[in-house]
Image (cartoon, helix red, strand yellow):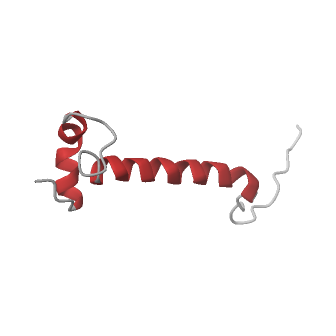
């Protein structure tokens, strides 16, 4: 009968390091998306409106109050 020998347990496995070159583009994209979302929730349909009408205001109305932005 053959016996297999398992390697000894070392505790925990260390995570592989992530190079900055692979993380940076995703971090920049995430930051841009967050700024666009913050603009639409906080400032759109105000003095700096990019879109006409009240559609954006109606979609983000409750989010504005939840985040403390005054809207009317």
Q: Residue at x 42, y 48 (%)?
A: 36
Q: Nearer the viewer, residue 53 or 65?
A: 53
Residue 30, above or below 8: above
Judged left or right of residue 67, residue 2 is: right
Q: Position of residue 58 (x, y in %)?
A: 17, 38
Residue pushed farthest right?
Answer: 2
Residue pushed farthest bottom?
Answer: 11
Q: Residue at x 59, y 54 (%)?
A: 27
What number of labels is visible?
A: 0
Res 42 → quadrant = bottom left
Q: Position of residue 17 (x, y in %)?
A: 74, 60
Q: Residue at x 18, y 36 (%)?
A: 54
Residue pushed farthest left?
Answer: 72
The answer to whether residue 33 shows anywhere in this view is yes
Q: Position of residue 1 (x, y in %)?
A: 88, 37
Judged left or right of residue 27, residue 45 is: left
Q: Position of residue 66 (x, y in %)?
A: 19, 56
Q: Residue at x 57, y 47 (%)?
A: 29
């Amino acid at each position: 009968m053959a016996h297999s020998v398992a390697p000894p347990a070392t505790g925990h496995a260390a995570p592989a390091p992530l190079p900055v070159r692979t993380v940076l583009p995703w971090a920049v994209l995430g930051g841009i998306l967050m700024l666009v979302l913050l603009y639409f929730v906080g400032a759109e349909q105000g003095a700096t409106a990019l879109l006409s009408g009240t559609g954006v205001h109606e979609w983000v109305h409750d989010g504005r109050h939840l985040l403390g932005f005054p809207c009317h």
